[in-house]
Image (cartoon, rainbow, N blue to C red):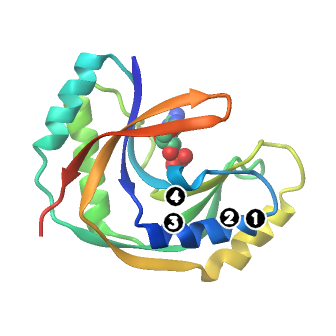
């Protein structure tokens, strides 16, 4: 079984601005710079033949390039925050691509997350219920001015995620070009 997901990689200058932001966070385990990405579809654990079919389905997708802009910070988890992330400016092309990947993955035999797509780049994971969420909430308010981009999205990728003692290791399995 292979734990896999589809994502958009970030250009180096965008990652650098996120790393600078991470340095100022009050708590949480920061995502390592090489793990900073925008998840499109989390595929979960897949048998290899299903992953191969997902790959073929992704490779058949023809979609246009678009630009993305990161804007502001957010918390998932309500009163017990578990994820601090950078948000994105609304983007119809991104949502359209995401919906197509989700449909393609399902048709290929995967069972991707059914939760509504909420585009974000995870900056830090937090232990829910531990500590005072106040400083995190203040960091999100202070981060409302944060902007990075626009940057062009020219491809998306299929990644393997291996969970280890020191966090997840992500490996790119395939990359799919978008078109202009
Ligand atoms: P996130 O951290 O961006 O929110 C690889 O593990 C990627 O898949 C992670 O970036 C994570 O998204 C996402 N992911 C992991 N487990 C998930 C789950 N159970 N549901 C949805 N997305 C998940």
Dot 3 or dot 1: first in sequence order is 3
Circle 4 residue: 121
Instruction: Determine the CA span between mark 2 and mark 4.
Output: 12 Å
Q: Is mark 4 within 8 Å of ligand 1?
A: yes
Is residue 108 visible to us here? no
Measure the alpha-carbon separation of dots 1 and 4.
15 Å
Question: Reading the chain from its start, which is encountered first: label 3 or label 2?
Answer: 3
Q: Dot 3, crowdedness within 10 Å: few (<14), some or many (≥20)?
A: some
Determine which of the numbered discs, if any, sits on residue 15 in the image.
Answer: 3
Please give left or right for residue 19 compared with residue 116 in the image.
right
- Count up the numbered dots: 4
Disc 1 crowd rating (10 Å Cα; few below 14, some 14-19, many 20+) is: some
The mark lying in front, picked from 3 and 4, is: 3
What residue appears at the point 86 percent right and 44 percent down from the top-left corner?
Answer: 130
Q: Are marks 3 and 4 in contact (CB under 8 Å)?
A: no
**Spot occupied by residue 81 in the image (x, y as percentages of width and height):** 73, 50
Front residue (pair 48, 106): 48
Between disc 2 and disc 4, whose residue precedes?
2
Q: Confirm or deny contact between disc 3 and disc 1 (CB under 8 A).
A: no
Mark 2 vs 1: CB contact within 8 A: yes
Q: Is residue 52 left or right of residue 150?
A: left
* Secondary structure found at label 3: helix
**Which residue is denoted by mark 1 in the rendering?**
25
């Amino acid at each position: 079984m292979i734990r896999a997901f589809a994502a958009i990689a970030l250009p180096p200058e965008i990652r650098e601005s996120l790393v600078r932001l991470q340095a100022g966070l009050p708590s949480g385990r920061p995502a390592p710079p090489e793990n900073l990405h925008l998840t499109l579809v989390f595929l979960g654990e897949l048998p290899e033949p299903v992953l191969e079919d997902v790959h073929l389905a992704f490779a058949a997708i023809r979609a246009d390039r678009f630009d993305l802009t990161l804007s502001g910070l957010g918390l998932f988890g309500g009163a017990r925050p578990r994820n601090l992330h950078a948000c994105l400016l609304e983007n119809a092309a991104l949502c359209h691509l995401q919906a197509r990947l989700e449909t393609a993955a399902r048709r290929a035999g995967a069972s991707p997350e059914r939760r509504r797509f909420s585009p974000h780049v995870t900056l830090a994971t937090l232990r829910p219920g531990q500590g005072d969420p106040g400083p995190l909430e203040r960091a999100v308010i202070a981060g409302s001015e944060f902007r990075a981009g626009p940057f062009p999205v020219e491809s998306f990728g299929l990644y393997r995620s291996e969970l280890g003692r020191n966090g997840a290791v992500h490996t790119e399995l395939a990359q799919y070009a978008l078109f202009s």
